[in-house]
Every structure is written in structure tokens, then in C-alpha cells.
Amino acid sequence: MQRLGAADGRATLTLLARNLQRLEWAERVSISPGDARSVLAASRVLSKGEPYAILVIMTSIVDLPPDARAVFNAEPLVVAAALLGRGPMDEVLAAGACRALHPTRFFLSESSAREWLELSLAARSP
């Protein structure tokens, strides 16, 4: 399993399957636009420049300002983003993703999130 660090070691990206990534953040992280750009650069390396789907673990994020969210929302290589949280606070942080270029959904179950991402990837395959 291939892994890359980003955002000065506060984010870890893992390649779960071809074109399927998992993003996990350090505890109690506040994400800056620079952090978002760092994560997307690492994601592009993992995907080898191909479109990819991503599972984002939201549970340790305490602040995701609009300018950082805008960086994530504008990534053209993302096919779909599943935002995994534990409850209403995580869902509030995830709400701004509705403006993304790609389909984005909030989930409380990792298995449901991965299933949705896999279906999103399959729908793009020739």
C-alpha cells in the first residue's frame, strides 16, 4: 500500500486501490489553503496524473476555512469525494463541498462511502 505525507506531516494519503485514495489528517487540525494545495499535489503523485476518487476522513478536522475549501473544490482530477464523519459537527464542516466541481457526499459509514466511490469510478470506466 503506497502512502504519502502532505501538509508538513499533518496529512497522510494512502492509495487504497487503483485511482482510489484515502486522506487522513492529524488530530485537531486546522487546514490552510497551503495545506490543501500540498494534499492535492501529493494526490496527483499517487494518481500518476489520472482522475481519482478520494475518501476524506473528517473526524479530526476542527477548521476548514472557505479559502482552503475552495482549493479542494476546484481540483479537476477528482472524480468523486466521500467525506466520512461521526456526526453533525463533521457534516457542517463538509457542507461547503457542495460547490465542488466533482460529486461529493457525506457519510457516517466507511463501507458505504467506499462503495459509493467505487461506483463513481466504475461509471467513468469505458
Image (cartoon, rainbow, N blue to C red):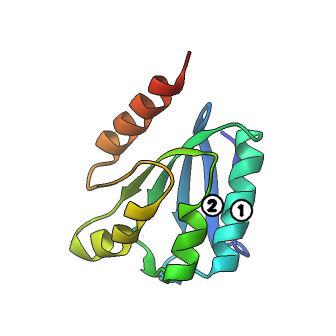
Which label belongs to residue 12? 2
Marks 1 and 2: in contact by CB < 8 Å?
Answer: yes
Instruction: Please indicate, yes or no, whether residue 26 appears anywhere in the rendered image.
Output: no
Residue 13 in picture, x, y percent from top left: 63, 55
Left or right position of 9 against 81: right
Left or right position of 93 against 33: left
Looking at this view, is 38 or 79 the one in front? Answer: 79
Instruction: Please indicate, yes or no, whether residue 119 appears anywhere in the rendered image.
Output: yes
User: Secondary structure beneath disc 1?
Assistant: strand
Q: Residues within 10 Å of mark 1 (few under 14, many from 20)?
A: some
Q: Amino acid at mark 2?
A: Thr
Residue at image coords 47%, 57%: 56
Residue 118 in picture, x, y percent from top left: 44, 31
Cα gap from disc 2 to disc 1, whole angstroms:
5 Å
Quarter of the figure with the C terminus: top right
Q: Residue furthest top?
A: 126
Say above or below: 46 vs 25: above
Question: In the figure, residue 94 lies in which quadrant?
Answer: bottom left
Q: Amino acid at mark 1?
A: Gly
Q: Residues within 10 Å of mark 2 (few under 14, many from 20)?
A: some
The residue tagged 1 is 5
Left or right position of 40 against 30: right
Quarter of the figure with the N terminus: top right
Residue 79 in picture, x, y percent from top left: 53, 42
Looking at this view, is 53 or 3 the one in front? Answer: 53
Residue at image coords 43%, 63%: 99
Q: Residue furthest left?
A: 88
Looking at this view, is 120 or 20 the one in front? Answer: 120
Say above or below: 18 vs 9: above
User: Secondary structure beneath disc 2?
Assistant: strand
Looking at this view, is 109 or 105 the one in front? Answer: 105
